[in-house]
Image (tube, rainbow, N blue to C red):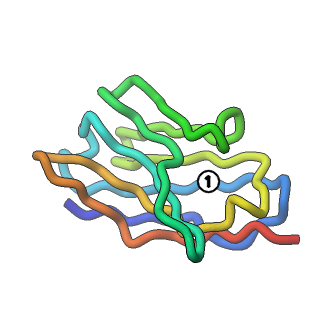
Amino acid sequence: VELVESGGGLVQPGESRKLSCTVSGSAINSNNMGWYRQATGKQRELVAQIVNRRNRNYADFVKGRFTISRDSAENALVLQMNSLKPEDTAVYYCAVIWNWRTYWGQGTQVTVSP
């Protein structure tokens, strides 16, 4: 399984950004897939996840601002990020559990700064 994130970059506070994670093969049908992030000097943390293909869970710090979705046509896991804040600055990773293994992408840097 190969995961490739894209869409990171430098954005100003209050702006929006969409991250995409292309998932190889049938793993796009995983029942557990999500986005995580890791800021410098901090532990990796869950941002949002789709469980059992329908249930969406969000960390409190992104509720109402971020939306996770699956684009089956593009074999991609998408994270729409709105109203970005400087504290959202981090490397964002997608992860998929498939056949009892967890697969990670290489990460994409998102920097929120004036």
Image quarter (top left, top right, bottom left or bottom right) of the N terminus: bottom left
Q: Is residue 66 above or below residue 19?
A: above
Q: Quadrant of residue 50?
A: top left
Q: Is residue 113 above or below residue 53?
A: below
Tell me if 92 is positioned left or right of 4 in this view: right
Give how far across and how far down residue 95 sits, in percent: 34, 54
Give how far across and how far down residue 54 sits, in percent: 39, 24
Residue type indicated by callout 1: Lys
Which residue in the protein does label 1 denote?
A: 18
Q: At 38% across and 72% down in the image, what residue appears?
A: 106
Give how far across and how far down residue 112 sits, in percent: 75, 67
Q: At 65% across and 42% down in the image, what residue appears?
A: 62
Q: Residue furthest bottom?
A: 40
Answer few, some or many: residues within 10 Å of disc 1's Cα (few below 14, many 20 plus, some between 14 and 19).
some
Between 24 and 112, the residue placed more toward the observer is: 112
Between 23 and 107, the residue placed more toward the observer is: 107
Q: At 37% across and 41% down in the image, what residue appears?
A: 73
Q: Quadrant of residue 12?
A: bottom right
Image quarter (top left, top right, bottom left or bottom right) of the C terminus: bottom right
Q: Is residue 44 above or below residue 72?
A: below
Give how far across and how far down residue 30 sits, in percent: 24, 39
Tell me if 7 is positioned left or right of 96 in this view: right
Q: At 30% across and 38% down in the image, what residue appears?
A: 32
